[in-house]
Amino acid sequence: MGPVFGLQGKLADWRREGIIDADQAERIAAFEAGRGRPRLALALAVLGAFTIGVGIIAIVAANWDAIPIALRLGLHVALNLGLGAGAWFWTRPVAVEPSARGEGTLLLLSLSTLALIAHIGQSFQLQGSAAGLLGGWLLLVTPFTLLLSRGGLNRWVWIAGLFAWMIFTLDDHHAWLSDHRLIMTVSMLFLALLHALRSDFSRLPPVWARHLGQVAVGAAILGTSIMLMIVAPLLTRPVEAAVRTDALIGAGVGLAALLGTHLLVPADRRGPRLGLGVAVALSPVLFILPLLFTGITGAIVTGVAFCLYWIGLARLALLAGRAGWYRLAVALIAVRVFVAYLDAAGGLMATGLGLILAGLVLLGLAYAAWRVMDWRVGRPA
């Protein structure tokens, strides 16, 4: 039978294989059930802490010119020290559930650190870029965020800052990278580095390693999907040769780098997990398809490639027990097919022959999905 989604199915399999006993299965189920409950108190506490911070900033901003520079900086540093002490005190005890006070204080400390860097630059009229500001922030907040963060909110704030720093850095050096055909290569190496941090070699806490790996994979395949589904229809003319060269080099580097970092984890070197790794590594190759094919040919190639890619990912997700990936694949395929029909209705292929060809393509995709996904009830996977 096909893989069973859900914790209960996995626990039943582990009990049959002798990995855990009934008592351990019951404790694991209780723990996961408690962890899955909505954390309303944590969300309200973090929102309250953020609101207080905004209020303090508003008061200071209203009296900014009347406060001496030394006093302003001194109070800001004292605020950071107080927030740091509070975050340390409330997050050091290791608990199953993240502390609402600890996570809220840690978020305020992270935001206050970013504001302190900007405050110093503004007070002494220092010149710098957004990439420099975010780079300094990452250097200061990374140690205590890695050490103290228990919930996902602060991890996402840190990751958002990391991606923003990367985007601003690429923008600052765009001319040099463009001249050397390295824009896509640098982007792919950045994602591959994040993906490599999921391995044991990084020595990161497991929750951080898993999170960074998922973010890298998500950025790779969702970026490819956006390129095929949204950007491709807007490209009506061939792109410049320099852009194609940059993209081709980056696609090759990304294919090798993402596949290599996937193989760093021994459990991912066989079975459906290996297939998922290969699919992720192929995402840079699909990313450049709209740059190689334009017009009606490009629309057909990118549309079919998009659907077949996500049909394959959905099948691999079924085999690997990744329910989230499966649901995402089904949703994206449905959206892409819907967009294809909107294009047809809007007159892009409004001739009778064009509609017939579009219908045949959709029927072919439906048949491919039926064969690959093996939807027939009772058939072994």
Image (cartoon, rainbow, N blue to C red):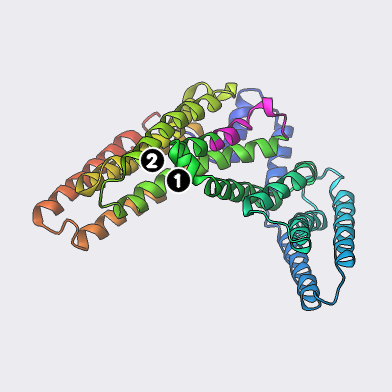
* Residue type at tag 1: Gly
Indicate the secondary structure of the residue bearing disc 2. helix
Residue range in magenta is 190-204
Left or right: 252, with 123 as reference point: left
Q: In which quadrant will I find the C terminus?
A: top left
- For image coordinates 53% across by 34% down, the residue present is 189
The residue closer to the viewer here, 241 or 267, is 241
| Residue 50 versus residue 137 in the image, above or below | below
Residue of label 1: 223
| Residue 19 versus residue 352 in the image, above or below | above
Residue of label 2: 287
Q: Is residue 36 visible?
A: no
Tag 1 and tag 2, C-beta contact below 8 Å: yes
The residue closer to the viewer here, 4 or 65, is 65
* Residue type at tag 2: Phe
Left or right: 370, with 279 as reference point: left
